[in-house]
Image (cartoon, grey):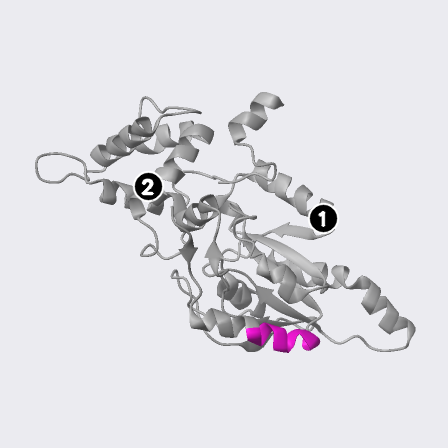
């Protein structure tokens, strides 16, 4: 895969706007996708935010493997960053966010109290890549529909301060993808969950990489969803994965003239099912980089 260049103008402006607002910010609330926390973590954010306190939210935790999500929470804890699994759509875990933010700022708040100051509401910057659920989270925190939401990357284009109760004020920003993906695996993972437009990468390539991983780590999920009798495990050859895709295509009626499988249509079936949670709770990466199967084998 060639290096993906992806840096629309509004993302360049977003970085500049964030840097301009830093002096007003107490804490950065970094929203990641629980299925791919590291791949959905923009490395530019560390440079942009510098030494600002950080709270990590693992959104869409309802779609991720709960055991692996616990591993990610421990991973961030070792970095000195508290991580909280949430589901912005249902509100699961969202009520804990203001208190977690204040806890991350406890030293600053305690210093203000010692000086006789009445601490104001915590001012937080919501950061994250496109389509990770920032607008849905903000609407949930604010208790009303304020931020525009959608299932396409890049819905949020502007900036606005939003009150989330008496203890928290939020600054929403457009999602920022980094200028290019040097690691093709990161690009494919983000494409698989829908954070990169389906027009950027070939759908068949994205689905192939996702299917290879799922065949290895979650074969039972594939068998159950598509009524398959055989799914290759670790070390499967490319033609074996294509065979699984063709079997799925036949099960779902993705046929073209002559009776052969339309692999593009079959690929979209797999990606829609993955993104919608119909393949079960799947995490596409682990903190240690190993597959789920390898971790179980190693104990």
Q: Say which element carries label 1.
A: loop
**Residue drawn at (87%, 69%) of the image:** 111
Q: In this view of the protein, can residue 133 be seen by the observer?
A: yes
Image quarter of residue 265 = top left
Above or below, 33 against 261 in this view is below
Q: Image check: 125 left or right of 10? A: right
Q: Image check: 105 left or right of 96? A: right
Q: Say which element carries label 2.
A: helix
**Residue drawn at (64%, 51%) of the image:** 84
What secondary structure is the magenta-colored segment mainly?
A: helix
Residue named by callout 1: 79
Q: In this view of the protein, can residue 146 be seen by the observer?
A: no
Part of the protein shown in magenta:
16-24
Image quarter of residue 264 = top left
Furthest toward the front, the residue is 2
Membership of 20 in magenta stretch? yes
Cα distance in 3D space between marks 1 and 2: 35 Å
Above or below, 1 against 154 in this view is above
Residue named by callout 2: 270
Image quarter of residue 150 = bottom left
| Image coordinates for residue 234, horizontal then vertical, percent | 44, 25
Above or below, 218 against 199 in this view is above
Q: Nearer the viewer, mark 1 or mark 2?
A: 1
Quarter of the figure that contains the C terminus: top right
Above or below, 269 against 134 in this view is above
Q: Nearer the viewer, residue 196 or 56?
A: 196
Mark 2 neighbour class, 10 Å CA radius: few under 14, some 14 to 19, many 20 or more? many
| Image coordinates for residue 205, horizontal then vertical, percent | 33, 43
Mark 1 neighbour class, 10 Å CA radius: few under 14, some 14 to 19, many 20 or more? few
| Image coordinates for residue 34, horizontal then vertical, percent | 54, 48
**Residue drawn at (63%, 55%) of the image:** 56
């Amino acid at each position: 895969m060639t290096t993906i260049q992806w840096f629309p103008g509004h993302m360049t402006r977003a970085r500049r706007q964030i840097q301009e607002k830093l002096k007003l910010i107490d804490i950065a609330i970094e929203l990641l996708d629980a299925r791919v926390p590291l791949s959905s973590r923009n490395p530019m954010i560390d440079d942009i935010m510098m030494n600002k306190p950080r709270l990590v939210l693992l959104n869409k935790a309802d779609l991720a493997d709960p055991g692996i999500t616990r591993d990610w929470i421990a991973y961030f804890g070792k970095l000195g960053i508290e991580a909280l699994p949430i589901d912005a759509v249902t509100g699961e875990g969202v009520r804990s966010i203001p208190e977690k933010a204040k806890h991350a700022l406890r030293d600053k708040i305690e210093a203000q109290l010692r000086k006789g100051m009445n601490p104001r509401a915590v001012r937080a910057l919501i950061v994250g890549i496109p389509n990770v659920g920032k607008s849905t989270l903000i609407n949930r925190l604010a208790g009303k529909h304020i931020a525009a939401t959608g299932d396409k990357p890049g819905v949020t284009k502007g900036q606005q301060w939003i009150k989330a109760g008496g203890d928290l004020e939020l600054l929403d920003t457009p999602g920022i993808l980094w200028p290019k993906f040097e690691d093709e695996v990161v690009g494919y993972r983000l494409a698989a969950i829908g954070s990169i437009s389906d027009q950027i990468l070939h759908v068949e390539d994205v689905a192939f990489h996702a299917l290879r991983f799922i065949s290895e780590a979650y074969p039972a999920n594939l068998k159950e969803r598509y009524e398959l009798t055989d799914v290759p495990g670790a070390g499967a050859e490319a033609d074996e994965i294509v065979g699984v895709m063709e079997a799925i295509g036949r099960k779902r009626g993705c046929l073209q003239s002559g009776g052969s499988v339309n692999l593009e249509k079959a690929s979209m079936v797999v990606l829609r099912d993955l993104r919608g949670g119909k393949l079960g709770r799947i995490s596409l990466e682990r903190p240690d980089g190993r597959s789920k199967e390898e971790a179980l084998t190693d104990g």
